Amino acid sequence: MSNRQPTGQRAQRWAPDLGAARLVGGGRTAAMLRRDAVVQWWCAPDFDDPSLCWQLLDPDGGAAAFTDLTFFDADAGPAGSSARTLLRGPAGIVEVWDGLLDAGTGVALVRLVRPYRAGGRGGCGQETVEHVLRLGGFAAPRVEFQVDETVARGSHLLRGRQRAVRVHADSHPVREGALHSTLRLTPDRWTALVVAVDGDLNPDAAELAAQLESRDGAERDRLVSCWLPRLHSERAADALAVLRACTYRPTGAVVASPTTSLPEAPGHDRQFDYRFTWLRDASVSTAVAALLGQPEDARRYLEMAHRAWAARDMRDTPVLDVRGDQPPDQRDVPGISGWARSRPVRVGNAAGHQRQYDALGLLVEAISVYLQVGGRPDAKTWRLVTRLADGVALASLDDRGLLPQSYRDGDSTPDAAALMTVAFGLLGHHDPRAGRLVDALIARLGVGPYLYRYPPDGGGFSGTEGAFLPVSFLVVTVLAKLGRVQEARTRLDRLCAELLRLLAEEVAPHSGRMLGNAPLVWSHAELARALYVLDAEQIRDRWGAAALWVWRLYRYLALRHQQARHRPITAAHQQRPEEIMATRSHPAGPPAATIRPGSGGIGRSSSPAAEAVSDALRSGTGHFLRQRRRIALLQTGAVAMLSVVGLYQFGLLPSVPELPLPGLDADRVDASGEAYALFRTPDSSLGIASAGMSLALAGMGGAMRHRQQPWIPLALLGKCVLDAAGGLLLTAEQLTKHKRVCSWCIATAALLVATVPAAVPEARAAWRSLRG
């Protein structure tokens, strides 16, 4: 371990921008990259192992950087399975592609470089780039390298024993303890630098690029299958990306943050190690994955909570390590200057035996959300809920509208965690105490669009911490639930405008500087929850409670279908869903022969290509396929509504059943006579036949039909517009001519109108295809 004491003006000013960093996840650990592709944080092979790159906390810390190259441009996403950066060199632009891949029993940092040619034109005169690698020295000795041709070897102290470190590149001179690797650039080809820890990886650049592209393609496919809110949808996608990057794949544990010792109050002692999994994070991860249409991920996070806390008292064990064991004791790491000179720098965590009751409520809420969007209940889940209910009781609000911070807090110190009582329904939105509680917390803890968790100079530590981002988003959630939709929307818009896309734990309200460990999963999770709740409450506010109920029912049925059809993503299924349907010669899912009869006998014949389209229409996850299923559901619902009217018009019902509400009288507004005058048949049968045509158009063709048969999506959009216009015309006729309405007909018209926005995206893509 290094015992040096950092000095100098550089260390005094050292405070890298946390919000501008990018996170690359690898399933066991994650790397933090600066805008210019400097790897400034990386623990390997697991999240909680000693950090190899730690320049985030010290200007002289370990890092991986390209010399003589400066930032030019980068991909916009704050997190993902890889990151791409454009760097400007003396002779041109260089493209860098970073990712983390499995390397035997360990992991590898893969850095691919090539000359960048904008638009496929011109070229880059850069012939070589130099990469400098300095590893270790944080809670462990620095890595000393021995060079053997194109491989540099060293060792890393990991959990009590030395583990191998191997670096592959073109050449490796060692100067002043750092490995200087030269990479030769070739037009249109990648060149690789590989840093493998506790394993090894073939340094073939083309193969590594294929692996990174496969990982990226799988993440894109997951995003296509998500249910993102309409408002600030990119922020919801960011939340899922950060959540997946912070997931430890072997167990399904989610670390609160992949970093340690980033201060909540710069220059003081509020630094902690968050590279562990809290019951709270397992809970919010379950809820957010479920809300955003990833039920399989939600199930995995919930299963992890079952396994890790099955034999433990959840009230006394809020945090575990990623393997499900007790986290190591907290200790200080000497010789580190710290972010903004904030010391001590800590590893390990002392929260292992705290009582954090809010986590218990979050877990119950996560289970509730998981079941509401299609998850299946089981005996162990109900046993878990029963254990929690038996061990928790609620305190009451005081005359100022505040809940006490703890059961023995006679002064009712305001704590924004009390917002959960409204967010999760312990205080209903019609209860006047709910509004008083929210307004009291905003008045006592608010600053601009932000909220402090509790008075900022409290908590038993020195210094003044920043506003707490999870509760800043939680107040948006509760305002929306209270029906104060515009107030919630205004607050959320301000937060998204002021904050960068990679969210830390806290923010300095007056400067906008991120504080605390970054990124923080809880911050992203509460942002995603606020987006979902506000999206739902805007539907209620605009269309009424019935429309919200229909929307939620549709999501429930669709997600149950998605869960039933889920198949693990394998190397053979890394193509985009549209490409799979367009090229596969065998059906998706179970072979058709196992569920449908083969050739022979009386009946129609089929083909592998036709079976592939049929199976993928049922189980594919492409965005346009989801919209086509939505149209099918809406049109089928219209048929169901019209069938009730048809039973009356054909004399099978004595009258159309109606709710005893003013203005509803289906018998009085029956339009079968008008239909007979024009088409010699009741209008219900015409409507059912019309819906059948729309269903045929929705089901016709494969997932690439917007390119191969663009007339079909355009025809479907035209038909949906005609259906909607017909429904609105009949509604207007009832209101103006009969002064009464048929609730079945109104519901039919609403369903038909809803098909139009579902048909627009594919039709737009078809129009672009026609125009070349």
Image (cartoon, rainbow, N blue to C red):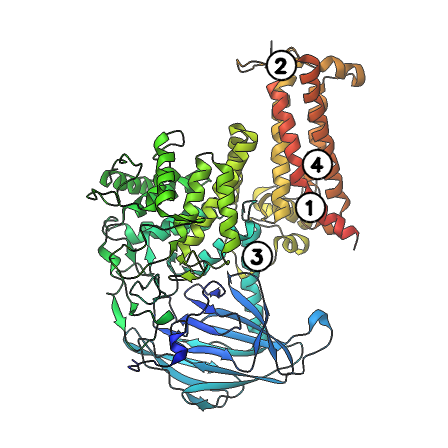
- CA gap, disc 4 and disc 1: 16 Å
Q: Residue at x 63, y 36 (%)?
A: 632
- Residue 157, by quadrant, is bottom left
Q: Residues within 10 Å of mark 3 (few under 14, many from 20)?
A: some
Mark 4 secondary-structure assignment: helix
- CA gap, disc 2 and disc 1: 36 Å
Q: Residues within 10 Å of mark 2 (few under 14, many from 20)?
A: many
Foreground: disc 4 or disc 2: 2
User: Which of the numbered marks, if any, corresponds to residue 696?
Assistant: 4
Judge by depth and name the residue closer to the eye, 429 or 459. 459
* Above or below for 642 versus 754: above
Mark 3 secondary-structure assignment: helix
* Above or below for 715 versus 733: below
Amino acid type, label 2: Ala
User: Which of the numbered marks, if any, corresponds to residue 666?
Assistant: 2
Amino acid type, label 3: Arg
Name which of mark 2 and mark 3 comes first in the sequence.
Answer: 3
Judge by depth and name the residue closer to the eye, 228 or 232. 232
Q: Residue at x 30, y 36 (%)?
A: 400
- CA gap, disc 4 and disc 2: 29 Å
